[in-house]
Amino acid sequence: MAALLLGLLLFAMQSPPIPSRPMADEGPPLPPTSSPTNNPTTSHPNGTLQQFPQIIIIGVRKGGTRALIEMLSLHSAVAAAQNEVHFFDWESHFEKGLPWYLSQMPYAFPDQLTVEKTPAYFTSSKVPKRIHQMNPDIKLLLILRDPTERVLSDYTQVFYNRLQKHKRYQPIESVLVKDGEINLGYKALNRSLYYVHMQNWLKYFPLKNIHVVDWGRVDQGPLPRDEKGGEVLKTGIADKRFKFLLQ
Ligand SMILES: *[C@@H]1O[C@H](CO)[C@@H](O)[C@H](O)[C@H]1NC(C)=O
Ligand SMILES: *[C@@H]1O[C@H](CO)[C@@H](O)[C@H](O)[C@H]1NC(C)=O
């Protein structure tokens, strides 16, 4: 666990953070809408400011993105956005422009890395281009898990939501298979076609900017139930925020 966390941070820190001010010889500063590197905007008396993210967790839905951002935010070098921002995939948000996006970011100290996560980004075909326009050097984290398990988890979440709202639901057999074939029109299934979506990202970002985390490796945790407390503490997994990793 510790090694994974360290690896992610090293990956994120490979290139220097976005410069906070334009260079003197670049002429007058551009308005924030056209230059996201025109960080920071408002800084607070306590020394924090809102910065554009240097890292975005782009997916995948039901892949453990919450666990990943929680783990990262344990590190003092990281400031994580509380909610899923849905800036690049929801038109109603995207229309508000980059100043709005910035306003959704957590207050961070200048030497901290800002991270946001919106797992729907990975499967939205318009998102890679938009993120690239904001910052072509940004680091992207993608946490993947077994695609079949992911579909089941996705279905289960929707199933319970509908059950709670007393809405009708379709049994899984009827959504997965249509006319005797795998039903690729089923959105949850499409989300597990990782190669389809990945190709879209690779049109805009080199592989070195995309760090893939394998949920299987985070999740399998070589931790039998009777593991000694000391061992657990050493890996940091005893922290209650990691509990869901062990379930
Ligand atoms: C600094 O001020 C901001 C804005 O009021 C606040 O959200 C943040 O929690 C403060 N941070 C610290 C470390 O005091
Ligand atoms: C799956 O999703 C991608 C991206 O949104 C889309 O381009 C593609 O047409 C979808 N495939 C199917 C079979 O629905």
Image (tube, grey):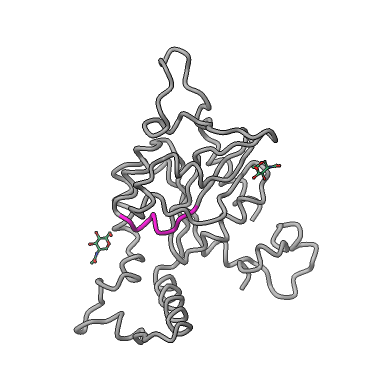
Question: What residue appears at the point 46 percent right and 64 percent down from the top-left corner?
Answer: 145
Q: Quadrant of residue 49?
A: top right
Q: Is residue 67 left or right of residue 191?
A: right
Which quadrant: the N terminus? bottom right
Q: In the visual, does 124 lie left or right of 87?
A: left
* Count of all numbered marks drawn on residues in the image: 0
User: Which of these two is toward me, 153 or 101?
Assistant: 101
Position of 97 relative to 16 (above/below): below
173 horizontally vs 222: left or right: left
Residue 211: x, y in percent? 46, 48
Magenta-span inclusion, residue 14: no
Q: Find the residue positioned furthest to the top.
A: 25
- Front position in the image: 124 or 108: 108
Q: Going by the picture, which residue comes out furthest to the left? A: 179
The quadrant the C terminus occupies is: bottom right
Residue 29: percent from left, percent from top? 43, 22
Q: Which residues are magenta?
A: 117-124
Image x and y of residue 191, in percent: 35, 65
Ligand 1's quadrant: top right
Tell me: residue 133, above or below residue 229: above
Q: Give the residue at x 62% y 66%.
A: 221
Above or below, comparing residue 211 to residue 245 in the picture:
above
- Front one among 94 and 1: 94
Q: Residue at x 80, y 62 (%)?
A: 230
- Is 122 part of what is drawn in magenta? yes
